[in-house]
Image: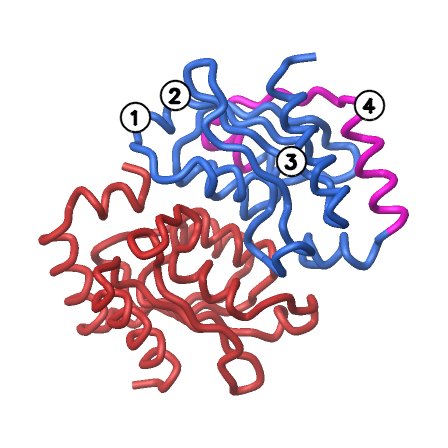
Chain colours: A blue, B red
Amino acid sequence: MDEFMQAAIAEAEKGLAEGGIPIGSVIVHDGKIIGRGHNRRVQQGSVVLHGEMDAFENAGRQTASVYRDCTLYTTLSPCPMCSGAILLYGIPRVIIGENQTFMGDESLLESRGVELSVLQDPTCIKLMEEFIHNSPTLWNEDIGE
Amino acid sequence: MDEFMQAAIAEAEKGLAEGGIPIGSVIVHDGKIIGRGHNRRVQQGSVVLHGEMDAFENAGRQTASVYRDCTLYTTLSPCPMCSGAILLYGIPRVIIGENQTFMGDESLLESRGVELSVLQDPTCIKLMEEFIHNSPTLWNEDIGE
């Protein structure tokens, strides 16, 4: 598997080990990870730091020219908030671990010209299937349900 | 003026006094402010804490039933990221100070059934006009340009 999706999965697994929601993300520029993150709802009581948002935050302040040459990797299909952040910063490509356990706002991203690639990766699917099975209330909270 | 938009403006002014970007927001539930915030790009080096996002974060973890009975007030038309957060959490009503200096993703919000009200408030417009005039580079960074 792509080393960057592996890094996103490693973030998701770190989140799970912390008692959190197992979703991870990395942002790649010029062949290098400039930001990595995972969901922080449990760990920090954060309602905005989904995995993708945490990766944006950890990448820090970047210029538009950098964002427009980045690829974002995420273990799970991006929700409306994370999709909005991808649009705000003009990230042109998103690699998605899977969208079987949760379908995010992929149609919005595609309608705005973002290039998506969905891997349906078994490790990503298993992480979320087990988590949703074990913690349905927490999962529903994370997706506003 | 509505006391809640006044509270959002007070947040924007607090941000400006801190050397930050003057955009503020409050989230109201049952006639009470449950979260207030302002843009934290300068103060915390944050790329995700726009005013609306900071208000969500400061409101903390809420149930879906609370979010679905909230009104979000923001001094400026919400960008794609903040619009996405509004959609994720199912906020049904957004009161917008102005959309003359920046038009956010109002069409997306409306297409998903969010009720918008735009005040074109002179105080909100003046805050942004002066800020954009004085700090165009910082402003462009905040909107991904």
- In whole angstroms, how far apart are the C-alphas of marks 3 and 1? 24 Å
- Dot label at residue B126: none
Q: Which residue is mark 4?
A: A122
Confirm or deny contact between disc 1 and disc 2 (CB under 8 A).
yes
For image coordinates 60% across by 19% down, the residue present is A4
SS at badge 2 = loop
Q: Which residues are magenta?
A: A108-134
Q: Which quarter of the rendered picture does the C terminus of chain B lie within?
A: top left
- Give the image location of residue B78, x and y in percent: 39, 56
Q: Is residue A2 left or right of residue A18?
A: left
* Amino acid type indicated by mark 4: Pro
Q: Mark 4 or mark 3: name the one nearer the start of the chain.
A: 3
Q: Up-down: is A28 above or below B115?
A: above
Q: Label 1 vs label 4: CA separation?
A: 34 Å
Q: Residue at x 45, y 54 (%)?
A: B82
Question: In the rendered structure, which disc, 4 or 2, sits on the residue that comes first in sequence?
Answer: 2
* Residue, disc 3: A24
Q: Which residue is mark 1?
A: A65
Asked if the residue at tag 2 contacts the one at tag 3, i.e. Cβ–Cβ closer than 8 Å, the answer is no
The reply to the same-chain question for discs 1 and 4 is yes
The dominant secondary structure in magenta is: helix
Q: Mark 3 or 1 closer to N-term? A: 3
Sort mark 1 into few (<14), some (14-19) or many (20+) by Cα contacts within 10 Å: few
Q: Residue at x 47, y 39 (%)?
A: A58
* Residue behind mark 2: A69
Measure the alpha-carbon separation of dots 4 and 2. Answer: 28 Å
Q: Is residue A19 left or right of residue B88?
A: right
Marks 3 and 2 belong to one chain? yes
The residue type indicated by label 2 comes to Asp
Q: In the rendered structure, which amino acid carries the disc numbered 1?
A: Ser
Q: Seen in the image, is B59 located left or right of residue B117?
A: right
